[in-house]
Image (cartoon, rainbow, N blue to C red):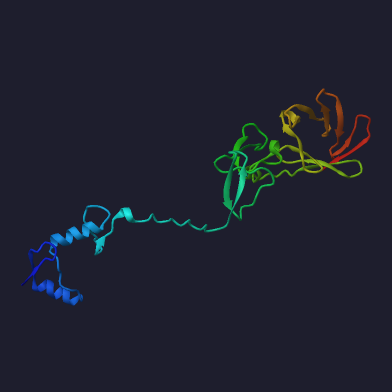
Amino acid sequence: MASISCRDCGSAFDFSEGESQFYASKGLNKPTRCKSCRAKKNGGNSNTSQPRQSNPNGGNASNTSTRQPRQQSQPSPSRPTKELWCAGGQHMETLPLSYEEPDGNFYCKRHPYEALCAGLWDPRTQHIVKLQYKPDDDLAWRCKECRSIPTNKGPQMRYGPNGAPLGSTDPYGTIRDASGRATGFKSAGSGGVANYTGLDGKRRGTTYKDPNGGSTSTDARGNTKSHTDTRGNRTNPRGDNKGYTR
């Protein structure tokens, strides 16, 4: 074991054979200061009076106050997106680029549009469905489940005297014009009586079954509008041809 004199304080400190071999293997010169003076020197070079702390990964840990904050990189989107205005929540909603935009207003999942499903046009089957769009025919709209209910009765088509289509009545009672737009509803009652209402819910007329198998239609005041025979041919009270129903 050798003894070395410190160049700063002049005191002698021990330098063992193991330390000598370690310094030689690393290509380092022998120390010229004692441990106390080395600690003071290292502390003087730092920004604080505290000596450097040892790093678990090896070496000395630098003072955290001298480090620059790391800039966080913004993650790149995994897929292209687009923004739509939500009419329900009055805000912009980010959606995948492949999202199919509705024809009218868009409603996000957090602020959906609550549409009344007409069901089978029976008050007991009507219910609210949350949608991301507003149906064009809101008063006669039906959800996918109700439209899929099987029925053996097809739609009744109405034609004029010249054979031109006038409209139809579907199996659920929705009355539509020739363009397919809903104009009212038909609800079947007891004894072969059917009541007709407009989109506003007001009564428009009634149809009664005749003893001979045909039917008679009246307006809201009870005035006769037309007669329909067993073949579906319609005539007015004067007997003029008004078309047919199939």
Q: Quadrant of residue 15?
A: bottom left
**Relative image position of residue 55 (x, y in whole percent):** 24, 60
Identity of the residue drawn at 18% across and 58% down? 40
Q: Quadrant of the C terminus?
A: top right
Q: Does residue 117 lie above or below 5 as drawn? A: above
Report whether residue 186 is seen.
yes
**Relative image position of residue 189 (x, y in whole percent):** 72, 29
Identity of the residue drawn at 62% across and 32% down? 124
Count of numbered tags: 0
State the residue lying farthest toward the top: 221
Q: Quadrant of the N terminus?
A: bottom left
Left or right side of 188 for 98: left
**Relative image position of residue 158 (x, y in whole percent):** 83, 41
Q: Which one is in front, 90 or 110?
A: 90
Identity of the residue drawn at 94% across and 34% down? 240
**Relative image position of residue 126 (x, y in whole percent):** 63, 35
Left or right side of 78 for 137: right
Report whether residue 52 is seen.
no
Q: Does residue 12 lie above or below 190 as drawn? A: below
